Image (cartoon, coloured by chain):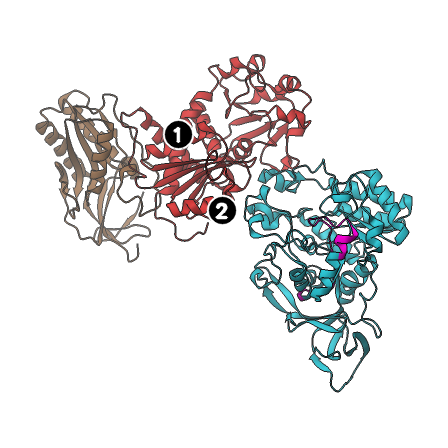
Chain colours: A cyan, B red, C brown
Amino acid sequence: MTGTWLIRGARLLGGDPADVLVRDGLVAEIGPGLDEPGAGRLDAGGLILLPGLVDLHTHLREPGREDAETVASGTAAAALGGFTTVHAMANTEPVADTAGVVEQVWRLGREAGRCDVQPVGAVTAGLEGSRLAELGAMADSAARVRVFSDDGRCVHDAVLMRRALEYVRAFGGVIAQHAQEPRLTAGAQVNEGEMSGRLGLTGWPAVAEEAIIARDCLLAAHVGSALHVCHVSTAGSVEIIRWAKSKGWQVTAEVTPHHLLLTEALASDYDPVFKVNPPLRTAEDAAALRAGLADGTIDCVATDHAPHPLEDKETEWEVAAFGMTGLETALRVVHEAVVEPGLLDWAGVADRMSARPAAIGRLSGHGRVAPGEPANLVLYDPAPREAVDPTAQASKSRNTPFAGLVLPGRVVATFLRGRPTVLDGKLAW
Amino acid sequence: MNRHLISAGDLSLADALLILDTADELASMAERPVKKLPTLRGRTVVNLFYEDSTRTRISFEAAAKRLSADVINFSAKGSSVAKGESLKDTALTLEAMGADAVVIRHGASGAPHRLAGWVQGSVVNAGDGAHEHPTQALLDAFTMRRRLGRLDGLRVTIVGDVLHSRVARSNVLLLSTLGAEVTLVAPPTLLPVAVGGWPCSVGYDLDAALPKADVVMMLRVQQERMNAAYFPTVREYSRRYGLDAARMALLPEHAIVMHPGPMNRGVEIAAEVADSVRSTIVEQVANGVSVRMAVLYLLLSGPAQQGGQR
Amino acid sequence: MAHAADEAGRDQRPGGSPARMVLEPAEIRRALTRIAHEILERTSGAGDVVLLGIPTRGVPLAHRLAERLEQVEGHPVPAGSLDITMYRDDLRLRPARALGHTEVPTAGIDDKIVVLVDDVLYSGRTVRAALDALGDIGRPRAVQLAVLIDRGHRELPIRPDYVGKNLPTSQREIVRVLLTEVDGEDAVLLGTRQEGS
């Protein structure tokens, strides 16, 4: 692949068309009527140019569950979705709670070379919630971990959460909490409300998320630390975060594409493809999440890409695994959920899906398209409308809730530090 | 009628009355010397019971056999199911065997829905988790109609652990379709959060509800619920929500007492109530066979369905 | 059920093809009276006779016959109904049908002469099903068949013992029997099957 690319006529952040010159891994120049002999040419007429997307919440499953996904397949899916960095969550087997495991995941990402993999370190050893993992060692490792999360589980012990929040200040880290009070959600299957009553499934009450978020915002304020809230799913959670931010506290939050678009009504046929943690909620919740993303209360979109093999999803609901894939559909779903209705423009999408997650992840080199910045870019065609086909995806797993749903848009090209990982909607190698 | 019977909510008023009227005719068959009809000869009905329930399984078996269908029993213990075979693989095996109908009882809500996507035959829900038990509701309605002569405007009070009860869910749906007025009585902890949206009224005071009830249906309460703090002690539950002889005297003279079984004598229902003349507990069993015969007849006659669509 | 009749005596039924009345109320009355007398003759006084009408219209016919038998002989003759839906041989061909009512008189049918009563005899399959149904209820000494109309086109070796009227028809024609107890009037109509009906 040549190191020099001339992207012509792209709408930068959805604005007026411009040409972008990529050279030696950087954005060299942006302007009208650029030319560069010998450069690879990409005609981007009508395409939106965004900074490469940054996912704060992905499950790559390696090590341990390579039947569901590997770093290689997951990063291929990420690139096809327009991502140039993904944060790989720590609930692997073994758990990523040591420098050794996080460095292994980081290296696998570099070797695959399609997308930067930034490992997330566990907060507690083994995700068991009883004592802190070696957060410092992970921060100092080659993986340079800054985001720590027990995602999959909640750090429910208030003292432990306080200690974790305090401890990571030493190296500018942030704790990302999966907010789920465990006793209130024992055996929970679906949102607690109309659906749980009708379907005869144990409910997952909104208060179990909101109570933890409220507590953690107060804790973070008290000790002066940064808190990031994973996969916000309820209207009440949005309100609590809005309140915390109004106090000037260092609270950030993410929402998944599926929570922006889908609701609990989809569970009515007991198809476990719609089973996820936190569960799909009501239409009112989804509307509040969209509004929260639009006004910036929710800082970013994070996929919580959770691949599962068929045998863990083709079962009775109660027995099925929680989780949905999302890397390859994220941008299209965000387009449908907040751009089409006019809640957010493309500059806003760039902010929520690249700039802010890069900032929260304390990443440099991602999140901006500007001369001198590494050329991490995605070119997106907003025009087509097509049904999602799970069999055409690069992820090893097929558990997408959007199967068969007609969504707008198509990722045309993705560049990772000036090198195309995706061209014409397909992996470049 | 639909190809499957999975939820009582799937039945229109016309469907429900058709089943009850058909069961009425079939009930008289029980007095004949030859208790067999050739109607489902050559059809295969599979009983797929993941939960132990001899009573329900035998009821479906008798119903199928009285219609001359072939019956195959799969019970969870000692089968490939016990060895961890998935529901899907079991379904594919049944398909290969050519089951015309699968009667499924399963501990997971929604298992019949999943099964319906994997088999061509009819799926009859014999109880799935806490979700529904439509043939129970049908035999309950049948029993009420036989004893009291009507269903429209009948005042039915259902008492007990509604939150975990598939019988309660199916009964609320079916009885409201049939025009009855349903009241649920339970401690607040045993009522679903969104019960306000159900087609029934709700109360916490059993004594207040009894004088206005034509039918009282007692639900079984599991002692284990005490350990999850749904109620403090069995004694307190029984005192506040148990139907004893004193409470039975509060009922209107014509009122009947029902229980889907099995009973916890002394917890939700006193022995003398269970054995009283108002109690329909024994005839509910006989009625179960007639109702299940009606369901199997109505689902299985007619041309075989093409394709796996529902 | 009032309806208009044109000059040719053809009845216009809503939604149906023009139908011709082939048996008027008085003729039906006389046919039933004659059948009743024939029953009395052949069973030597109907002492052991049980009339079973096949729903729907066989049932009022059975009751009318029972009335006439009682008028003449002075003792009641048991009459009831026998629904044969569950014994049909075409259950797999059509969606499930609602059941008619079966009521066997308390005296039962063992060692009795059962006279099955139906409005129209056509292929004979209904009667075949009725014979199977009877066999599961008891063991009659004999089974006889009384029908108001025999329209021919038998598909099984079944023959009636008592016939109100023999009505040769083509397969494209429909025979419709109306009885006051069910339809508000007495008549037998003959019409042509609509294309596609």
Q: Is residue A242 left or right of residue C136?
A: right
Q: Which mark is residue A113?
A: none
Q: What is the distance, in whole Å, between disc 1 and disc 2 at their CAs? A: 29 Å
Circles 1 and 2 on the same subunit: yes
Q: Position of residue A274 (x, y in %)?
A: 61, 50
| Mark 2 neighbour class, 10 Å CA radius: few under 14, some 14 to 19, many 20 or more | some
Q: Nearer the viewer, mark 1 or mark 2?
A: 2
Drawn side of residue B94 relative to residue A77, left or right: left
Secondary element at image label 1 = helix
What is the chain letter for disc 2? B
Residue C157 showing in the rendered view: yes
* Residue type for callout 1: Val
Q: Which residue is mark 1?
A: B289
On screen, residue A19 above or below B84: below
Instruction: Indicate the position of residue C130 as horizontal and vertical percent values.
Output: 22, 35
- Based on the displayed image, in which of its 4 quarters is residue A206 positioned? top right
Report the front residue among B73 and C1. B73
Labels in figure, total: 2
Q: Look at the numbered disc 2 and give the secondary structure of its residue.
A: helix
Residue occupying image coordinates x 60% and y 22%? B209
Q: Position of residue B227 (x, y in %)?
A: 67, 26
Residue range highlighted in magenta: A80-103
Which comes before the other along the chain, label 1 or label 2?
A: 2
Disc 2 target residue: B88
x and y, in percent, of residue A98 in the image: 78, 50
Q: Amino acid at mark 2?
A: Lys
Q: Name the residue located 67 percent from the left edge and 49 percent from the top edge.
A: A283
Q: Which residue is outermost to the front? A: A100
- Tell me if residue C64 is in the magenta stretch: no
